[in-house]
Amino acid sequence: MSSQDMETFGSIAMIEHIIRKFRELIDTDGSIQPELRAALHATLDEHLLDAKKRVLLRVH
């Protein structure tokens, strides 16, 4: 595996970690209504996919 591949996987892992931490915050904050919680998770899903695409496009 090339160093560029390792950097790409590392970047994606970092992005996933950050998104996971946001999810934890959303899920543990009792003041967030379930409907809003679902919308926030959907937004995070979109941002995660977009971020992964940007990383992959940067290296190819």
Image (tube, helix red, strand yellow):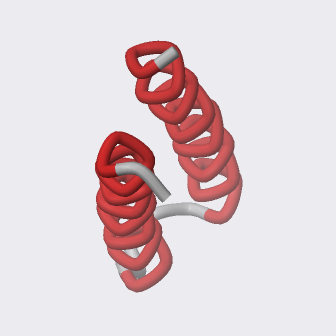
Q: Position of residue 55 (x, y in %)?
A: 42, 28
User: 9 above or below 53?
Assistant: below
View extreme (front): residue? 2
Q: Quick check: 9 above or below 34?
A: above
Camera-nearest residue between 29 and 10:
10
- Residue 4 appearing in the image: yes
The image shows residue 34 at horizontal and vertical percentages of: 66, 64
Q: Is residue 19 visible?
A: no
Q: Is residue 53 above or below residue 9?
A: above
Place residue 45 in its image quadrant.
top right
Q: Residue at the spot x=34%, y=40% of the render? A: 4
Compared across the picture, whether 58 is left or right of 60 comes to left
State left or right for residue 31 relative to residue 45.
left
> 3 or 14: nearer the eye?
3
Percent of width and height locating residue 37: 58, 58
The structure residue drawn at horizontal position 57% and vertical position 23%, both measured from the top left corner, is 53
Of 30 and 16, the residue lying toward us: 16
Residue 38 place in picture, x, y as percent: 69, 54
